[in-house]
Image (tube, rainbow, N blue to C red):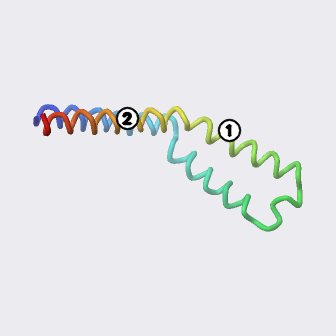
């Protein structure tokens, strides 16, 4: 069991580092800022600029989708494997 925990921890660490390569934290922060911008009352006062912001926001979100899927799959695999170790 200890060996399994160490392997999982190592894999999670590598997965977290992989997120750094893809600048996940930076992109998430920029997404938050763009979303805040879209909630401003004058956001649509310049439609071409608003459309550009929406397009950039969508592109950023799409670029993170594979990362979120990979992370979710790891978490599900970990949960299934870990529970099978204790409950079988």
Instruction: Please provide percent x and percent y for residue 58.
Output: 69, 42
Name the residue: 34% across, 39% down: 75
On the rendered structure, is 69 left or right of 29? left
Please, is residue 49 above or below residue 16 in the view?
below
Circle 1 residue? 59
Name the residue: 55% across, 36% down: 65
Q: Going from the N terminus, do you reach mark 2 or mark 1 first?
A: 2
Quadrant location of the C terminus in the rendered image:
top left
Q: Helix, strand or loop at disc 1?
A: helix
Instruction: Please provide percent x and percent y for residue 71.
Output: 41, 37
Specify the farthest residue to the bottom: 41
Please, is residue 87 above or below residue 51 in the view?
above
On the rendered structure, is 38 left or right of 51? left
On the rendered structure, is 70 left or right of 30? left
The picture quadrant where one finds residue 10 is top left
The picture quadrant where one finds residue 77 is top left
Instruction: Please provide percent x and percent y for residue 23.
Output: 52, 40
Q: Helix, strand or loop at disc 2?
A: helix
**8 or 33, which is in the foreground?**
8
**19 or 73, which is in the foreground?**
73
Circle 2 residue? 15
Name the residue: 34% across, 37% down: 76
Instruction: Please provide percent x and percent y for residue 34.
Output: 68, 54
Q: Are marks 2 and 1 in contact (CB under 8 Å)?
A: no
Name the residue: 34% across, 33% down: 14
Specify the farthest residue to the front: 88
Quadrant location of the N terminus in the rendered image:
top left
On the rendered structure, is 35 left or right of 27? right
Separation (CA) of disc 2 from disc 1: 22 Å
Please, is residue 60 above or below residue 34 in the view?
above
């Amino acid at each position: 069991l200890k060996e399994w925990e160490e392997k999982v921890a190592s894999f999670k660490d590598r997965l977290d580092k992989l997120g750094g390569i893809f600048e996940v934290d930076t992109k998430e922060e920029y997404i938050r800022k763009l979303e805040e911008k879209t909630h401003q009352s004058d956001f649509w006062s310049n439609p071409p600029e608003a459309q550009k912001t929406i397009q950039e926001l969508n592109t950023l979100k799409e670029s993170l989708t594979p990362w979120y899927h990979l992370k979710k799959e790891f978490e599900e695999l970990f949960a299934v494997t870990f529970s099978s170790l204790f409950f079988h």
